[in-house]
Image (tube, rainbow, N blue to C red):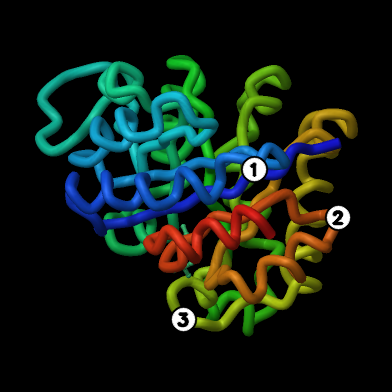
Amino acid sequence: MRRPVIAGNWKMYKTQAETRAFFAALKPQVAGSTHCDIVVAPPYTALAAAVEAVRGSAISIAAQDVHWEKEGAFTGEVSTKMLVEAGCRGVIIGHSERRQYFGETDEAVHKKLKAALEADLVPIVCVGETLKEREAGQTETVLNRQFRGGFSTLTGAEFSRIIIAYEPVWAIGTGRTATPEMAAEAHRFLRQLAAAGFTPERAAGLRILYGGSVKPDNIKGLMAQVEIDGALVGGASLDAQSFASIVNF
Ligand code: 13P
């Protein structure tokens, strides 16, 4: 039985003060929510405030990105050690916005993933096709390429510690969600890749989240699919009330 994960990706939203206000409102609404892992990924500058705010609750804090080197002359970057010290338990890697706007490659994703695993951070690695790729019938080719580029050299033990988020780029921030069936189909394909690349047991244990316009009114349908193990939520994770209703699907 795979334990569901509901994760919020705040992207470039919320100051420290807004972060404190968010968790003050969220905590009572999810205090009894023991059915899933709850993760929130604020921007770097709000990490410490978030970690402080969730102390004593079941909510864990993740970063939205990380650099693969331990330290060095890499202006603007942050290392795994810095995230661990700040109190992060996980990190999002390879989000499509990083791939699209900041030129992140499968190779970079792979290096970040290795660094995160080495630091004992739980990686949430994003994959997903663009609209052009889907319309050209290339969804599986793209997922296959991202899977191989990102994960193929992991050991089985390492692979069993990662979470994959399937985020079709055309569904992100567009209000256009993949239907539960479309998402489940992509998840099934990813699980097949996991079975072929690792073992059927590891594939069966792999948690695959769906991301792309997840809202309180569509989470139930998505979670009804056995292939969907949770959600990576953007816009709807910014409001405590709406994120709580997604957590409590
Ligand atoms: P939206 O939920 O705003 O579509 O964003 C999804 C996403 O990119 C989560 O990482």
Please name the residue that numbered disc 1 is placed on. Answer: 33
> 99 or 206, which lies in front?
206
Amino acid, disc 1: Ser
Please name the residue that numbered disc 2 is placed on. Answer: 226
Q: Residue at x 48, y 71 (%)?
A: 172
Cβ at disc 3 under 8 Å from ligand 1: yes
Amino acid, disc 2: Val
Compared to residue 179, the image places residue 167 above or below, namely above
> 156 or 2, which lies in front?
2
- Location of residue 90 in the rendering, given as x and y in whole percent from the top left corner: 46, 31
Tell me how far mark 3 sits from mark 2, CA to CA: 25 Å
Q: Residues within 10 Å of mark 1 (few under 14, many from 20)?
A: some
Q: Residue at x 47, y 52 (%)?
A: 8
Tell me how far mark 2 sits from mark 1, CA to CA: 20 Å
Where residue 210 is drawn, which disc sits there? none
- Location of residue 245 in the rendering, given as x and y in whole percent from the top left corner: 58, 62
Please name the residue that numbered disc 3 is placed on. Answer: 174
